[in-house]
Image (spheres, rainbow, N blue to C red):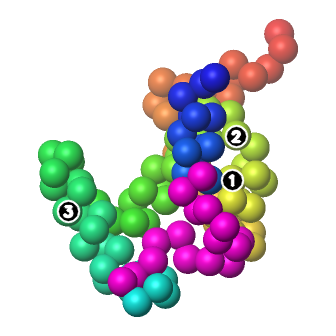
């Protein structure tokens, strides 16, 4: 079984009997974590990992979208996953690479 599949199954198992609308990360009171607490957790983890710069939950979201698009995920699927109403919003995550060209996708 591939690593990503095992990882996804492990994360799903952690949800237990939680419903689809249950918070992914719960506060000590049982509700969703406050966004400022999520930011502190992400920044602390980034510091422990030795990541430079201003890491944030949005930085992780941006990384997810960029890497998924780079690996060939359809833009409409990434848009749906991120909850974007418009594919144009998701398109901002697709960065032009100076060493890449759309010509490699043409059958010549």
Residue 75: x, y in percent? 73, 49
Query: What residue is shown at x 80% (from left), y 20% (from top)?
Result: 106
Residue 59, position in %: x, y? Answer: 39, 60
Give the residue displayed 48% in from the left and 24% down from the top: 99
- Which label's residue is closer to the chain start, 2 or 3? 3
Q: Can residue 70 be seen in this snapshot?
A: no
Q: CA distance from mark 1 to mark 2?
A: 7 Å
Q: Is residue 18 placed above or below 68 in the rendered structure?
A: below
Q: Mark 3 — residue?
A: 44
- Answer above or below: position of 19 versus 13: below
Circle 2 residue: 73
Decide if residue 36 is in sight here: yes
| Label 1 with label 2: CB-CB less than 8 Å | yes
Magenta highlight on residue 21: yes
Please name whichever residue, 3 or 77, is drawn nearer the observer in this view of the structure. Answer: 3
The quarter in which the C terminus is drawn is: top right
Which badge, 3 or 1, comes first in the chain's sequence? 3
Q: Is residue 54 above or below residue 69?
A: below
* 17 in magenta: yes
Residue 78 badge: 1
Left-right relation of 74 to 62: right
Q: Nearer the viewer, residue 74 or 105?
A: 74
Above or below — where is 83 with respect to 29? above
Few, some or many C-alpha atoms within 10 Å of disc 1 (few <14, some 14-19, many ≥20)? many
């Amino acid at each position: 079984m591939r690593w990503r599949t095992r990882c996804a199954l492990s994360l799903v198992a952690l949800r237990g009997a939680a419903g689809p609308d249950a918070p992914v990360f719960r506060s000590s009171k049982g509700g969703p974590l406050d966004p400022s607490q999520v930011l502190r957790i992400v920044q602390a983890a980034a510091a422990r990992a030795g990541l430079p710069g201003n890491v944030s939950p949005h930085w992780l979201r941006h990384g997810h979208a960029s890497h998924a698009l780079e690996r060939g995920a359809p833009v409409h699927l990434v848009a749906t996953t991120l909850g974007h109403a418009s594919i144009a919003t998701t398109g901002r995550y697709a960065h032009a690479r100076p060493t890449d060209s759309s010509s490699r996708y043409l059958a010549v």
